[in-house]
Image (cartoon, coloured by chain):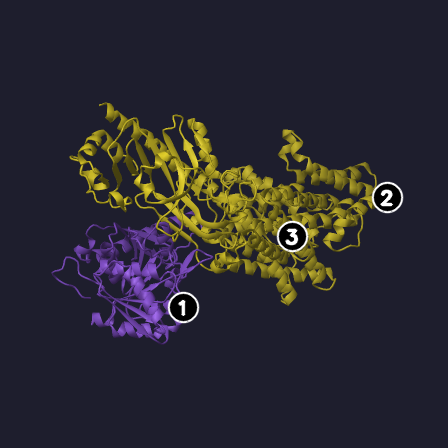
Chain colours: A purple, B yellow
Amino acid sequence: MSVHPNSSSPVLFKKVLFGFAFSPNLENNLHEVFRVCRFLDAELTLLHVGACTEKKKADLSSLLDQIPDAQVVSEVLWKEGDPFQTIYDQCDLLNIDLLMIGAQRHEALFRFYVGSVARKLTRRVNCSVLLLTNASRERVACKHVVVNGVLSDYTADAINAAFFVGQRLGARQLTIVEEIAPNKVQVAVDDDRSLVKSLRKKHQLELREDERVRSIVSAVPASYKEGLSYRTQPIFGKRGYSIGHYAEISRADLLVLNAEKHTSIFKRIITRDIEFILSDLPCELLIIRPKKAQNA
Amino acid sequence: MPKTSFIGSLHKNVFAGFVVSLIALPLGLSLAIASGMPPSAGIVSAIVGGVVVALFGGSHVTIAGPGYSLVVVILTAVTTLAGGDYYQGYIMTLSAIVLAGVIMFVLGLLRMGGLAAFFPSSAIEGMMAAIGLSLIAKQFHVMLGVETSKKGALELLAEIPSQVADFIALASQNSGVLIIGSLGLISLFILLFNSSIRNSFYQRIPAPMWVLLIAIALSYYYEFTGFENPIPKTALISLPNSIEQLVVFPDFNFTWPIVSVALTIAFVGSIESLLSIKAVDKLDVFRRRSNASKDLRALGLATSVSGFFGGLNVVTVISRSSVNVTQGATNRSSNFFHGTFLVLFVLVFSQTLNRIPLSALAAILVYTGYKLAHPLKFVSAYNIGFEQLLIFCVTLIATLSTNIVLGVLIGALSTLVSHLIITRDPLLFFLNVFKPNVLAFKEPEEDTYFVSVKHYCTFLNFYKLQKKLDAIGYTKKVVLDFSLCRFVDHTAMEGVESYVQYYEKKGGLVEVVGLDTLGASSTHPFAVRKVGQNPLSRVLTRRQKQLSEMAQEYGWSFSAGAQQLTASLGPFVFFAARSLNKSYNKLVDAEQRCVIFDVEYSEGEFIAKEDVKCTVMSLQLKGEVPAFTLSREGLLERLYALAGYQDIQVPNHKEFNKRFHLSGPNEEKILKLFNDQLVLFLESNTVYHVEASENRLLVFKNERLLSPSEIKAMAYFGRELVSLIECNFTS
């Protein structure tokens, strides 16, 4: 990760790619994307996959003209080809740190979900992904960030990024959710005696998880934590589901998850943790996947 | 009630076991005869159930023995399995019972103690009523002592008037029929009007035992007076003369018909037992929680053992268990003693038992059937909702015309169809049926657990909620939030009510919020609820009723329906930045200075997020206060319009500064307001968010709906706060 030793707040995402299509929501998404890039001090590249016609160009430039933001360096790329493959390749080619995609809205169910191309990208692309849900013209302050503290390869990266993005977007509160799968408790509650046993075991697990997360948080640069208060919230429940439900009831504005390392055939047959959230997005979702090139 | 030692409470359990055995004896005999088995089968079942379940069971005050739900299934098995050879059919049915025990044991190993929750309660009620009707169908003619050639339950029911006519015609010619039938009818009347006989001596002996005593007394009367007993030997029960004859071993040759009977016995027996265990837990004076899975294993073992020795299957029986509890049983030993007393009865009185006429025993079953299929059951199903009556009737007819398992499945299917019709939203069910939908966590810094249910809550997924509620422990405080639910069915409403009772018994509390905006289909508290137009004032939820009781208690006024927000809320930044949808459940104090209400609002430009529902309190002061916001330090800054202000440090109150975030434009005035008294008051209370503007205060706790007890606490907090601040004005 690139860390500027002298900067008060090192930048985590330098290059951002926004893959767009001409949809009614494009205007709002563009506003949101520019705003986020400004907060993150990032360079923005806009990528459209599909035929580049004069009309599209004119439409886009008229939209861009409305955005009163000249600070963000941006360029527009027009590529033709398979949407997934093109975006995937461009992310590698341009050394992108963060890919932004607009989520789709299911009109009948009042729910946001992730389309098939975007879903494939979130799984495979070699950088972090931000899925936009309630993009808007005017700024809606980001107040509450929820991040997953579950033990995984990229947990530290996810917590680090959550603090960084949260602070940059001006959030006040950060909650680190420790999802504990009920089978970890190893005691089935049948009667009063097993209940007492399971409660004791749960308490131990909570303490252990808390300890682990605390050590990760202590390693986060102090500059990221400025103005942000954080706390931990252990939840016993289905992994990947509980955090989404929690984000919904705690009115989170941004949910940060860490990507899973491998996507073997076997793992994809059983529903993976992230699928619950992708099919019912509670809020904007940032999936952290550190770049191999940067790590090297 | 304090717990006593095993030895110290032994006499109570011996007595309870004795009383229960007085009921178990006639019931065991009659159930076995009605099942087409020798009368001893019922006694064997009760003895084995008493001993085995007492030794290995996981419940505390239940009684195990032969149950009524499988009488018709076993009768059919005995008469058809061997193509009409009753003895061979009996042997083959025993092997099915042994196999059913193994299946129940496996269900117990798989921790299927919550199996009963998978079935809609109206369908279960319909099944029970069907069992009751078939008991009446099969036993009515036996009670009158007349012959019949019909087989099907529906045919037999239709034939009852002609059976009565036959009896009247025959009785005038044959004194045997007259005596048999009259004995049956007298027995039925004793059972029906048992509770209205207010004689303490009479009430000491359970009604079924009176039936036996009268029948036996009649037989002795004929013997001593020398008259010839008009009741022929064939109309009396015949117990085998010796132990060797009493015990029959099964024939293990498992063919598909036998396996299917075994599956039915295991399925229905498990459901009957689990429902009984749950019901008996509510009666237990020591408020213990039964280990249903362990009990299921013990019942499986008992069923196998009983089948091996020629007995009926063993289930947990609700009526005998409740007698057990009312007679003062404290632990499983009473079940054991009920078994041992039965052994004694058989050894001592086996010849006397042979004097009992079948008609008296049939009367016991006709009465049981009448209780199961009581006409009031239809009325109560209708009271919950018309659709529940339909489900009840569909299950009833399906069970009578096919079989129990298929009947319940048809009932479950019709419940699902009714849900689809009521909600007109099939996607809601099909998209979410396999997904988790319950979140439970402990709220920070409080001992409250918050449980939120999403999408819908019906018999299909109630077990998920049940698991969470079981794992929390009944001594805790739980806020159960349905505000993200679009549909809650009758089974879930009833299940939640059971949990409210379990928690209450153990000293915990379950409070349900978020149902107020769902419309109900009837005024019944367990009626189906779904997202609807403006249901708020039509049918009050438990929460609304409690709020209205609270209003009465305090001399406040309460209105449930949606209201226009008063203009007085204008100055608050909290409301200015949000688009208000509606407010409801308004509590107003006598002086109209304190208003508590639920508001629903959405944040952001689009209605992109779920609407937020939360309970707030607005207080009017007698003077003006400087604008300030006070919240828990570290909690998100809600009022970003005031976010520019720094945290104001109150001098000499380190702890307060650490816990609270206080901000506002006029630091000097605010510091003057927050004197020692106010700071100490705030420190010693639950942390609320307080916003002041001109002469009004806005108070709320969490950004969610509050339960009645939380609202009471908030009202008290508000009153104290106002008096402290106003005291400040004068000084």
Kindly report which numbered mark, 1 or 2, lies closer to the viewer in this rendering: 1
Residue A269 in the image, given as x and y percentages of width and height? 42, 69
Answer whether residue B333 is visible to the viewer in this image: no
Identify the residue under disc 1: A116
Distance from Cα at disc 3 to Cα at disc 2: 37 Å
- Marked residue chain, label 2: B
Amino acid type, callout 2: Ala
- Marked residue chain, label 1: A
Do the residues at discs 3 and 2 belong to one chain?
yes
Q: Earlier in the sequence, mark 3 or mark 2?
A: 2
Amino acid type, callout 3: Val
Q: Please identify the residue farthest to the bottom as the structure is shown.
A: A81
Front residue of A133 and A148: A133
Distance from Cα at disc 1 to Cα at disc 3: 43 Å
Distance from Cα at disc 1 to Cα at disc 2: 79 Å
Image-quadrant location for residue B401: bottom right
Identify the residue under disc 2: B169
